[in-house]
Amino acid sequence: MKKILFVCHGNICRSPMAEFVMKRLVRRAGLDDLFEIASAATSNEEVGNPVYPLAKRTLAEHGIGCPGKTARQLTRADYGRYDMLVGMDMQNLRNMERLFGGDPLGKLSLLLDHTPASDTLHHGRDVSDPWYTRRFDIAWDDISAGCNALFDKLTADIHERADG
């Protein structure tokens, strides 16, 4: 089972959007039993709060629900629990490295680093925080591109192991 944790600052916009986009990709492929997907915050500011209404609405516009999701804070134990911890921006990555004391097992990444280098619109960029920009459409586009690229990589690995 591949365990993925998406991480952003408050766990009310970007990381829950990524969590539920990836869950839909996995469900549609019939691979629920091969993945565990969740999200968390680097800060404690929003702990216990539901997904931000505009993020929830953006997901709903694309046929995705996020029932019962509330923000939780990242813990040191998450490094051992998850195979991949995927941040939305460089500040998230720095906060994770600080909490975990580095990344000795190479589990940390940025979401848009999973897009192909040829995707110059997305690759190597941060997912900007729509809490500040109010551009949930841009966040959706970035998160969707990143999750689709990550899903494609992970399922290619699954198929290679099944064939090999």
Image (cartoon, rainbow, N blue to C red):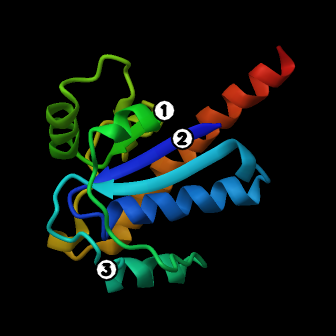
Type of amino acid at the residue the image marks with label 2: Lys
For the residues labelled 1 and 2, the Cα–Cα distance comes to 5 Å
| Spot occupied by residue 54 in the image (x, y as percentages of width and height) | 33, 83
Q: Is residue 149 left or right of residue 79?
A: right
* Residue nearer the viewer, 50 or 144: 50
For the residues labelled 2 and 3, the Cα–Cα distance comes to 24 Å
| Spot occupied by residue 61 in the image (x, y as percentages of width and height) | 52, 83
Judge the density around disc 2: few (<14), some (14-19), many (≥20) Cα neighbours within 10 Å: some
Residue bearing mark 2:
3
Residue bearing mark 1:
83
Judge the density around disc 3: few (<14), some (14-19), many (≥20) Cα neighbours within 10 Å: some
| Spot occupied by residue 105 in the image (x, y as percentages of width and height) | 38, 18
Element type at mark 2: strand
Contact check, label 1 and label 2, Cβ < 8 Å: yes
Q: Is residue 3 visible?
A: yes
The residue under the point 27% across, 73% down is 135
